[in-house]
């Protein structure tokens, strides 16, 4: 049976994993390669590394970080942040990534989805969507770019469907309403997007407890769920989380 | 020495890295002569079946046919496994090696009355693991491996393990010296590395 995936996300700045609460109080959480391996060993099904520096200087650091991380990592490995062209993507794949995650650059130039997919396969392209609910609630949820600072006027469902049609392999959906709050995923939003597309949807934003994951896999119809902060500083690990999920009736990769 | 065939189809680097990790010496090649001389050959691949067209153009198809007839060990991964079958509806004009019978087909959009998401992405379990499989030595029934694909191979006599998603399909195929896996052993953690090690130690 196909299991629900638990994805550990590492936010990287200047080559170090960082964690902030609501984008402030950023603290150093360690070396990306070391943390990626620790998460994989602790049962994470995939690793996502997001470069939040996205500066020119950050680029070389990122490639080096990807190389070091991928060297002995034998679970799927996604890299995102600042990938603006098929060449940027190629460099990241060469360094050992299995998938890239693109966000603002796909909005700016939707052809990029097909360009990367054409060379590396649809399975290698994740379109990340940052969504904020509108006045009507989930129905008019809007896509934001530039780290959530800029509204695009695009409806989330419309953009998800377009991304799929253009050849995205997966959607990584982050709810800005729930992100960083640890009060649970936005199940309504996730279910809406998941029902609208054929490709897998990864839920992100709001993970706090195992019950939150069970909810988003059930009611939220998510195929995978991503979390960052709860996995740092030894709060919990994927194996513990999965054991709880299994008890709640969710199909997960165990033993892992 | 394991010849790893380069036909510009994706996961080559990851596969080489994983093979080296389990102790293999590898040589990445496009040269049919190298394939003919190798005792073991790995054909990776991810993406579109169309990419396998290049194998015929490079003369690799003929080399593989000759080399497996002489008893060389062969492992196809993902599209590399699908290529061992007769072909795929993904690229109807491109013929596979035809070592195993049947065509690869797309997952159904609906299965048992429910919509089926495609691609099939994630960790799924190996069922009906054939005990005499050399590739699966030490791999338990129900072991998890990482899949990402939209086309799948049918269950045939040489199927060594199946996975269930919209019905059963071939996860592992194996007959004598020719083997294939639909999932990505190089991304399947300890279970996948075990299979690669089994192949290296043949």
Image (cartoon, coloured by chain):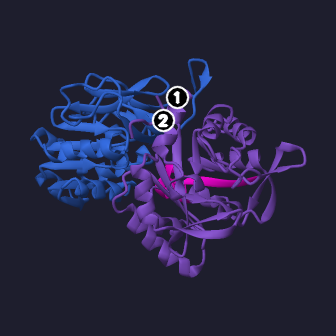
Chain colours: A purple, B blue
Left or right: A23 as drawn, with respect to A34: right
How packed is label 1: few (under 14 Cα within 10 Å), some, or many (20 or more)?
Answer: few
Residue A148: x and y in percent read 74, 62
Determine whether the residue tagged by mark 2 lies in a helix, strand or loop: helix
Q: Are marks 2 and 1 on the same chain?
A: yes
In this view, the residue in front, A187 or A25, is A25
- Residue at figure coordinates x 17%, y 59% from the top left: B25
Quadrant hosting residue A67: bottom left
Q: Circle 2 is placed at which residue position?
A: A243
User: Taking the image as drawn, is residue A95 in sight?
Assistant: no
**Image coords of residue B154 (percent x, y):** 38, 26
In the displayed orientation, state which residue is furthest to the right: A135
Q: Residue A128: x, y in percent?
A: 64, 55
Q: Which residue is mark 1?
A: A247
Q: Which residues are magenta?
A: A116-131
Q: Residue at x 55, y 26 (%)?
A: A249
* Residue toward you, B28 or B114: B114
């Amino acid at each position: 049976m196909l299991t629900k995936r638990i994805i550990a996300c590492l936010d990287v700045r200047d080559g170090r994993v960082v964690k902030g609460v609501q984008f402030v109080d950023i603290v150093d959480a360690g070396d990306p390669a070391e943390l990626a391996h620790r998460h994989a060993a602790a049962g994470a099904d995939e690793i996502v590394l997001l470069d939040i520096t996205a500066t020119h200087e950050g680029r070389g650091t990122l490639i080096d970080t990807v190389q070091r991380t991928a060297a002995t990592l034998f679970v799927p490995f996604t890299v995102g942040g600042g990938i603006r062209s098929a060449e940027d993507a190629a460099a990241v794949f060469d360094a050992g990534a299995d998938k890239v995650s693109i966000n603002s650059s796909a909005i700016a130039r939707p052809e990029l989805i097909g360009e990367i997919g054409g060379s590396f396969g649809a399975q290698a392209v994740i379109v990340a969507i940052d969504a904020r609910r509108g006045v009507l609630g989930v129905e008019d949820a809007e896509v934001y770019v530039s780290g959530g600072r800029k509204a695009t006027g695009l409806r989330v469902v419309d953009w998800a469907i377009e991304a799929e049609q253009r050849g995205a392999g997966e959607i990584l959906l982050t709810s800005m309403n729930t992100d960083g709050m640890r009060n649970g995923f936005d199940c309504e939003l996730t279910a809406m997007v998941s029902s609208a597309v054929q490709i897998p949807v990864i839920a992100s934003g709001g993970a706090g407890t195992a019950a939150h994951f069970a909810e988003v896999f059930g009611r939220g119809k998510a195929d995978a769920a991503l979390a960052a902060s709860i996995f740092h500083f030894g709060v919990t690990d994927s194996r513990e989380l999965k054991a709880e999920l299994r008890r709640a009736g969710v199909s997960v990769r165990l033993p892992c | 020495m394991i010849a790893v065939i380069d036909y510009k189809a994706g996961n080559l680097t990851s596969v080489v890295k994983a093979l080296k990790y389990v102790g293999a010496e590898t040589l990445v090649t496009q040269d049919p002569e190298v394939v003919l001389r190798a005792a073991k050959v790995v054909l990776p691949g991810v993406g579109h079946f169309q990419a396998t067209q290049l194998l015929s153009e490079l003369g690799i198809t003929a080399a593989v046919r000759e080399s497996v007839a002489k008893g060389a060990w062969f492992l196809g991964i993902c599209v590399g496994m699908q290529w061992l079958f007769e072909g795929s509806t993904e690229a109807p004009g491109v013929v596979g090696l035809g070592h195993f019978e049947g065509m690869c087909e797309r997952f159904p959009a609906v299965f048992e009355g429910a919509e089926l998401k495609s691609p099939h992405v994630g960790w799924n379990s190996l069922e009906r693991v054939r005990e005499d499989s050399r590739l699966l030595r030490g791999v338990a029934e129900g072991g998890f491996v990482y899949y990402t694909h939209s086309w799948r191979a049918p269950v045939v006599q040489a199927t060594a393990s199946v996975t269930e998603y919209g019905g059963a399909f071939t996860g592992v195929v194996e007959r004598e010296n020719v083997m294939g896996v639909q999932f990505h052993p190089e991304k399947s953690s300890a279970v996948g590395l075990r299979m690669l090690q089994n192949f290296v130690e043949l």
